[in-house]
Image: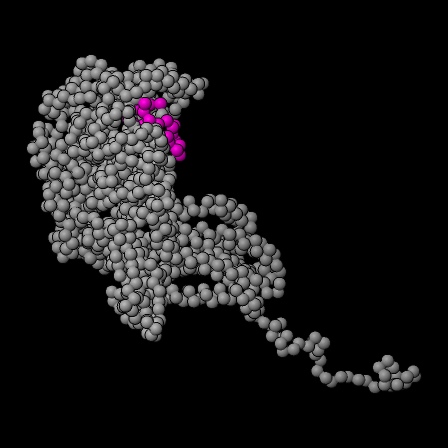
Amino acid sequence: MSNSPQNSLPPEGTKDLPHFVSDAPFDLRSVEKLTPEQEKIYFASQLTLMWWKFKRHRVAVWSGIFLLLLYSSVLVSEFLSPWNYQTRHSKHIYVPPQAVHLFHKGELIGPFVYDLKRKLNLETMQREYTVNDKKPVKLSFFCSGEKYHWFGLIAADNHLVCAPKGKPFYVLGTDRLGRDMLSRILQGARISLTIGLIGISVSFLLGIIIGGAAGYYGGWVDMIVQRVIEVLQSIPTIPLWLTLSAIMPPSWSPILIYFGITVILGLLDWTGLARAVRSKLLSLREEDYVLAARLIGAKPSRIIGRHLIPGFMSHLIASATITIPTMILGETALSFLGLGLREPITSWGVLLNEAQSINVVAIFPWLMLPVVPVIFVIIAFNFLGDGLRDAADPYK
Amino acid sequence: MTNTIRKMISTSAALLFMTGSAFAGAPDEPRVLNFDNLEKEMGKRGGSIKMLMSKPKDVRWMTVYSGARLVAYDETFQLKPDILKAVDNVDNKSFTLHLRKGHQWSDGQPFTTEDFRYWWEDVAQNEALFKGGPPRELLVGGEMPKVEIIDSHTIHYSWNNVNPLFMTALAGARPMYIYMPAHYLKQFHEKYGDAGKLAELVESEQVQNWSSLHKRFGRQYRPENPDMPTLQAWMNTTKLPSERIIFKRNPNYHRVDPDGTQLPYLDEVILNLASSSIIAAKAGTGESDLQARYVRFDNYSFLKQGAEDGNYNVLLWPSGRGSEMTLLPNLNTKDEGFRKAFHDVRVRRALSMGMDRGEINEAIFFGLGREASNSVLPSSPLFKDEYAEAWIEYDVDQANQLLDEAGLDKKNDDGVRLLPDGRPFEIIVETAGEQSQETDILQLITDHWKDIGVKLFVKPSQRDILRGRVSNGETVMSTWQGLNRGLATPEMNPEELAPASPIQAQWPTWGNYYFSKGASGEKPTLPEVARLSELYQNWRDAANYEQQSAIWDEMLSIFTDQVFTIGIVSGGLQPIVVSKKLRNLPEEGIWAFEPTLYFGQYLPDTFWLEE
């Protein structure tokens, strides 16, 4: 009874109460002790948290993987293409996509295509190809085929898959000069995909510097930047692109033109980003830690670069992912109009530009295939961006 | 105020039209067509056909197709009177033109020698209207013709020396007009018109002066003005700009069929405007009853596919052009390095020999074209194999050797030859950007020329811009179609072989010298070109067929041997979409601007619609 906690007080009149000191180590968090699992969550870095959040967005993950694969293919486009993208096969003009078979007369002989027989139909003025199913053309893998210069530098002749010399092998058909569409799409990806990355870097650099300055300094700097942005945003983009790309002299090498186009796309795209950076900085610069940094004597560039930007980098990355498709579409649109990239460089836009005529729609529909990768890449980027944006704010 | 004036003019025109139409009809002495010779069948009047065009100024093709000329080529390419009843030609020096009695303009006013007089005295010799004086086809060594009006239906032109150009110019696809509807145009002429009215019109039409007004309302080749009377088979009734231009039959047309039924059979020809790139697509769904313009050989398969559903046939007519496409090195380019290089005939020959015409023919023309230089076609009486085959052999070694000899023997790291001034021999070829075929061919040539150390860039622009750049000497090389007169006879004007006009992209400045009668441009400095100019002059003074023939021969031989234009493939085929209901268009024909006036030679006024 006396030990009951309710009656822990000593009886009345007791003298010299003993002094008690607990010698157990004092643990402030003893009440809210974390399990190891909880610890993992609570002490996770920002990046880890984002990754976890991101992983839960299934579609975004798959889009990311798809894009990763695509971008790594850019490194070895020449190897993956069965032919050089510029090689013309005058005997194989407008060949429709060929099917790859495994069994010949019930017998497994590995992947092969059938040889083609060409007939000029003078009635319709069409080249008619009939499958010669007596002659299978066996495909070889990791083989030596047409010579190429990897990235224009290293000479090689390795291909993932090739057909014997002079034999037709056009999985996605050929165009009006007998060039293999698959190879052209693969090599077009190199330009179309990277143009977004380079463009976005330009636009990022400009957006952060200009937007940062506007947000941090405020006042008349902000005023000017805002007005410039308004003017730039009010100009219709396509005519502006057209004008800028018309300025580029035709004697520039295609590579220079390519860089020119990316820079143009980047130069016009930074405005949205600059706005975001500015508004973010306007609120962040009032924070105590900024004041502290300033009192210590940090320079504005350091404060912006070191203390402010990292505070919302994740947002920037997410918004960049969403901007890349705009760049890709921009390049496609420009090239489609015949004002962007030009032969001999190829990109998806260039390929689509060639597929504009009514003949293609009616008779050679496979020339419109470059639309497919464009659509998939845009969708993938949008999902990825969506996932990243959700992940960028993991506490939500 | 200005509106009322405009209304007054149009009502007065309408009134004229109505009064005129009271006695509308063919002239008392019509031109009766002989259908047996022409292999035509008798048709029925009525109906309307649609054609597709791209720009408002394409109304000019109606003047070409319609084909009424003072004198016109018949099916054997002999000049015969058409609008005229007869021509008395004495040694190409004196010409008496006889008009048809009772011939009226489309508005019902009589067509008389007054219309010739008005043009000759008040228009051609008016400084404000014809700046440099009368057209050069009327001048012989600077001498003007003696024009005598004998009566209201007879007029006489004569020169001291021969003028072989006179008749051919009258029969041209873009003819020389030596008459104008005086009764209509006088109101715009300073001399006859009311000064107050003219001033107001100048104000309301926002032009500089009366002469611009006269020019604007008085165009005959390009019938833009619906109030302007015409002698062609159909007259424009739509004020431009419009997306749909309606041509109605001319009630006073001068040709009749063997039964005496006045032509044209068709009541209406409607031009619907559409962007040139979709015209083939529209024609393929049967939206055009007669279409050749803006339809190309590579559309043939597509057109053929839709022929059943669209209820049309597709004919293939060989083209009458000297070459389907030519490269034109600009001998007058402002770029001095390139100018010097192109002046060397070895360079021009090497460029020609460095292209594999066989592959181009195979890939682009289905192997049906003829690998040939830019010259006359085999069906021309002037044709010789040596012209067609001059410097067209694909021979990389010889081409390289020629270029080396021409002083372009140094190369840069990319294997591109260097000009003597150290710049790479990179040629920018400018195109009108209208045909993907051009770019395809240039793409092939780009690859061929790599082997001879020449780099080619394609710069597509736009027809009018290109023309402007050409006449300013800003182009280095451009592309255009070959000779229009691929079917030339010795009597036809050989102007395309000599510097004659600033739009000749191989020598715009020299052409301008002749064109402006020495006022601008420069005299040809290359001896061969100077010789061509001289020969052209000689042709104008030539008295007979034999002399003309000899001059044509020499000109063709210089022109092809010197490779002033680099022809690629000739004998292309022009698809013609024709409704199954439309009759009297021959299955076989030649598609040429001159001398056949595209459809004009096949008499579209005899085309009719079967129910």
Percent of width and height locating residue B433: 31, 44
Asked if residue B233 is among those painted magenta in the image, a careful observer would answer yes
Over which residues does the magenta segment extend?
B227-251
Displayed quadrant of residue B95:
top left
Q: Is residue B343 left or right of residue A21?
A: left
Q: Where is A130 relative to B349, above or below?
A: below
Which residue lies at the image location 41% right of the left edge and 48% below the top edge?
A241
Displayed quadrant of residue A41:
bottom right
Which residue lies at the image location 52% right of the left edge and 64% below the top edge?
A60
Q: Where is A40 relative to A96, above or below?
A: below
Q: Nearer the viewer, residue A395 or B105?
A: B105
Percent of width and height locating residue B117: 23, 17
Q: Nearer the viewer, residue B234 or A396?
A: B234
Q: Nearer the viewer, residue B354 or A375?
A: A375
Tell me, yes or no, if residue A305 can be seen here: no
Say which quadrant the C terminus of chain B sits in: top left
Q: Is residue B279 left or right of residue B394?
A: right
Tell me, yes or no, if residue B372 can be seen here: yes
Q: Is residue B430 left or right of residue B376?
A: right
Which residue lies at the image location 30% right of the left edge and 56% below the top edge?
A94
Q: Where is A75 relative to B565, above or below?
A: below
Which residue lies at the image location 25% right of the left edge and 36% below the top edge?
B598
- Coloration mode: one colour
Asked if residue B134 is among those painted magenta in the image, a careful observer would answer no
> Which residue is farthest right?
A13
Q: Is residue A325 left or right of residue A353?
A: right
Say which quadrant the N terminus of chain B sits in: top left
Q: Where is A71 relative to B159, above or below?
A: below
Q: Main secondary structure of the magenta part?
A: loop
Percent of width and height locating residue B568: 20, 48
Percent of width and height locating residue B502: 22, 35
